[in-house]
Image (cartoon, rainbow, N blue to C red):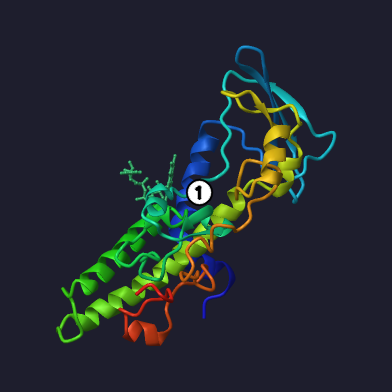
Amino acid sequence: METGAAAIFARHGSKLIQGARYAAQLLRHRVPVLHGHHIKEARGRERVSGAVFARTGPDGRFLAGTEKFRQVDSLAVGHGFVPNIELPVQAGCRVTHDPDLGGWAAAVNADMETSVTGIYAVGETAGIGGAEQSRVQGELAGMAILEQLGRIHRRQPRWDRFVKKRHRLYQRSDECRSYGALLNRICRVPAAAYGHIPDDTVICRCETSPCERSSRLSRTDSLPGAASRNPPAAAWADARPGHAAPSSSKSLRPSPAQIRKPSGRLFPGSR
Ligand SMILES: Cc1cc2nc3c(=O)[nH]c(=O)nc-3n(C[C@H](O)[C@H](O)[C@H](O)COP(=O)(O)OP(=O)(O)OC[C@H]3O[C@@H](n4cnc5c(N)ncnc54)[C@H](O)[C@@H]3O)c2cc1C
């Protein structure tokens, strides 16, 4: 049985190699990399001219006395990715909030079918996890659609091969999800970071709306995940009664009984 580093390499080896290549490129070009630091302030009048950064503790709070200033001519700040759920929401598909998926994402079963029968969501509509996850999920959805359309069925000689391939894809899909969860955990904005934003910081330049205002609004409105100091709460999950979420979005692989009867739906009431 694989343990420790060997198991991690077996599951995420390609990503580790990819990461090592990027790190080597940065090293070659002498780009300094500071771990455990966040940008604290952007300074400038007409345009950004400097940035203050500081060391952060494990909870994301700035450590006093570690601030440093550096002149800059541009500043890019990124905190992971957010699933694109416009299309599934418009189609009436249920969405679920899971920080391991990058926030709000279309709720899907193991075959990537949403709560609306016949609508599938793959890739970054169903959670952030990288290019391979999107490809694997696309294949799973394609196979489920072929079966739904009756293009493949258990009386055909190629059925066994189909089932075996799908099983391998379920496994890979789980592995990609665990990598995605790790990625989203590393890139997540720590809740404590919201507490650092001074009240007068302009959050929306169009309306010159300060942080204090959006904080106040998010306390009174029930907007989940609004830009505020309050971490998002799961509130849309019950938007469509009768379409309960899978009990855990971390492993959506169906039980053996469900694999034998693949047209069975994991969403109660979806058919
Ligand atoms: C800067 C950057 C670097 C990355 N680096 C890596 C990496 O090194 N390794 C890795 O594995 N992944 C990386 N990724 C992530 C990877 O690109 C994604 O995981 C992958 O592309 C997701 O595939 P997808 O099919 O879900 O979405 P996309 O590739 O984004 O495809 C979605 C498509 O849908 C279209 N679309 C969107 N909305 C609508 C609409 N309303 N109507 C019609 N069409 C619409 C878009 O135009 C787009 O063509 C990176 C992403 C970015 C942004």
Considering only vertical position in the picture, is 68 above or below 73? below
Q: Which quarter of the picture shows residue 147?
A: bottom left
Residue 265: image location, x then y, percent: 37, 76
35 left or right of 83?
right
173 left or right of 157?
right
Classify the position of the C terminus by image quarter.
Answer: bottom left
Any part of residue 59 in sight: yes
148 left or right of 180?
left
Residue 54: image location, x then y, percent: 75, 35
Which residue is the extreme one toward the right?
65
Residue situated in front as seen by the camera: 208 or 111: 208
Residue placed under numbered mark 1 in the picture: 20
Residue situated in front as seen by the camera: 73 or 148: 148
Q: Residue at x 63, y 50 (%)?
A: 222
Considering only vertical position in the picture, is 192 above or below 269? above
Q: Residue at x 61, y 12 (%)?
A: 46
